[in-house]
Image (tube, rainbow, N blue to C red):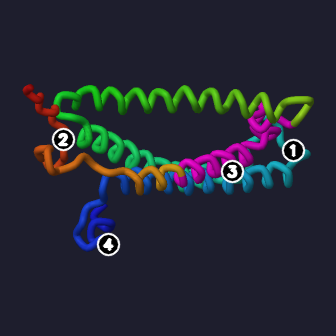
Amino acid sequence: METLHSYKGGKSLTNLQKVGLGLLFSILGMTAAALVENRRLSVVRANRGTVTRSTTLPISAFFLLPQFILVGIGEAFILSGELAFFTNNAPKGMKAIATGLFLTITSFGNYMSTILVTIIRNVTGRNGGHDWLSASINDGRLDYFYWFLALLSLINLGFYVVCAIRFRPNSTENSPKMNGAVVDTPPKEETV
């Protein structure tokens, strides 16, 4: 973070920038995962006659580190940016609800990932097709799944950038500042 801080001329990243950067890291993580899985499958094909379910492939598990590091960095940026965004932009009396909303959205994403896996399995295994997420990892095409996730994340990033550009924080004219964040105040009642 300190490197990014100095790169931006001493300015901190905004919450929206943190989320966008996190989404970018998730794309890079899925791309790394697809490349590693493609390499692993090429090792399986090269050793096809000798590979069983219990065979240890001549490939290091350390190849998995880049994808885990990239996805972990992405998660850190996304989660910290989202939580700060929700709490900083919530009206004063709704700060606790903003945290709950953040956790609800995270939970919704977990459910959606389960639905996505089910859809991918049904679509790719239909009509005798080759299921990408086969019971045997050596028979599946997990690399295709990772490429699909990278593409889906890229589309998500595109939508996110459009929304982030169009986002306007609360007006500072009628709203007080609280810890550097602008919060809504209830409108004044008019007397007749």
Give the magenta range: 130-158
Secondary structure beneath dot 2 equals: loop
Q: CA distance from mark 2 to mark 4?
A: 30 Å
Q: Residue 28 or 172: which is nearer the viewer? A: 172
Foreground label between 2 and 4? 2
The residue to which callout 1 is attached is 50
**Residue 67, x across and y down, in percent:** 55, 52
State whether residue 79 appears in this view.
yes
Q: Amino acid at mark 4?
A: Tyr
Q: Amino acid at mark 3?
A: Trp
**Label placed on residue 147:** 3
**Residue 128, x across and y down, in percent:** 92, 30
Q: Residue at x 81, y 35 (%)?
A: 124
Q: CA distance from mark 4 to mark 3?
A: 31 Å
The residue to which callout 4 is attached is 7
**Residue 22, x across and y down, in percent:** 44, 52
Q: Amino acid at mark 1?
A: Thr
Disc nearer the start of the sequence (2/1): 1
Q: Residue 187 or 191: which is nearer the viewer? A: 191
Quadrant of the image containing the C terminus:
top left
Q: Residues within 10 Å of mark 3 (few under 14, many from 20)?
A: some
**Label placed on residue 183:** 2
Disc nearer the start of the sequence (3/2): 3
Disc nearer the start of the sequence (3/1): 1
Q: CA distance from mark 3 to mark 1?
A: 28 Å
